[in-house]
């Protein structure tokens, strides 16, 4: 199953639900990166073999694009629209479907939008 690094805005309930579904999940608060900038978050995820999951499409997408343009590689970035906390099950369902379609290696240097297409 995938290894996901959730951004700081992801609720604890999402991390718990994903772990119950077999995902390996790490949060910034667990590795001392709370309040770190996007570059530091992407670097940690990349160096430790994680796909980065974020609600921050405004800046993280730009960071990921710049990262690849500068010759650096990342393990993938999954961007999700901010959803109410009650929508954890929707996000988990979409991530499970995405994981059925793509092996983790297929996301290398790719940004994927986790929208309704994955329902």
Image (cartoon, rainbow, N blue to C red):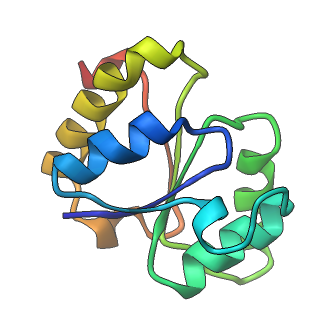
Q: Quadrant of residue 39?
A: bottom right
Residue 10 position, x and y percent, is 57, 39
Q: Residue at x 20, y 41 (%)?
A: 96
Q: Is residue 10 above or below residue 107?
A: above
User: Residue at position x 27%, y 63% from top?
Assistant: 2
Is 52 displayed left or right of 39 in the figure? left
In the displayed structure, would residue 27 be above or below residue 82? Answer: below
Quarter of the picture containing the C terminus is top left
Q: How many marks?
A: 0
The picture quadrant where one finds residue 65 is bottom right
In the rendered image, residue 73, in percent from the top left (x then y), is placed at: 60, 80
The residue drawn where x is 40% and y is 16% is 87
Q: Judge whether residue 113 can be spotted in this image.
A: no
The correct choice, above or below, for 92 with respect to 99 in the image is: above
Q: Position of residue 3 (x, y in %)?
A: 35, 67
Q: Quadrant of the N terminus?
A: bottom left
Q: Is residue 10 above or below residue 62?
A: above
Question: Which of 8/47 is in front?
Answer: 8
Q: Residue at x 66, y 38 (%)?
A: 9
Q: Is residue 48 left or right of residue 98?
A: right
Q: Where residue 43 appears, x then y in whole percent? A: 69, 77
Can residue 48 be seen at all in this image of the molecule?
Answer: yes
């Amino acid at each position: 199953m995938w290894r996901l690094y959730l951004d700081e805005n992801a609720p604890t309930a999402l991390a718990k639900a994903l772990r119950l579904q077999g995902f390996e999940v790490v949060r910034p608060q667990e590795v001392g990166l709370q309040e770190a900038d996007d570059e530091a978050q992407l670097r940690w995820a990349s160096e430790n073999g994680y796909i980065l999951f974020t609600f921050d499409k405004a800046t993280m997408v730009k960071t990921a694009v710049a990262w690849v343009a500068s010759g650096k590689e990342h393990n993938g970035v999954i961007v999700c629209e901010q959803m109410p906390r009650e929508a954890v099950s929707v996000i988990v369902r979409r991530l499970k479907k995405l994981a059925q379609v793509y092996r983790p290696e297929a996301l290398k240097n790719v940004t994927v939008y986790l929208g309704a297409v994955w329902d």
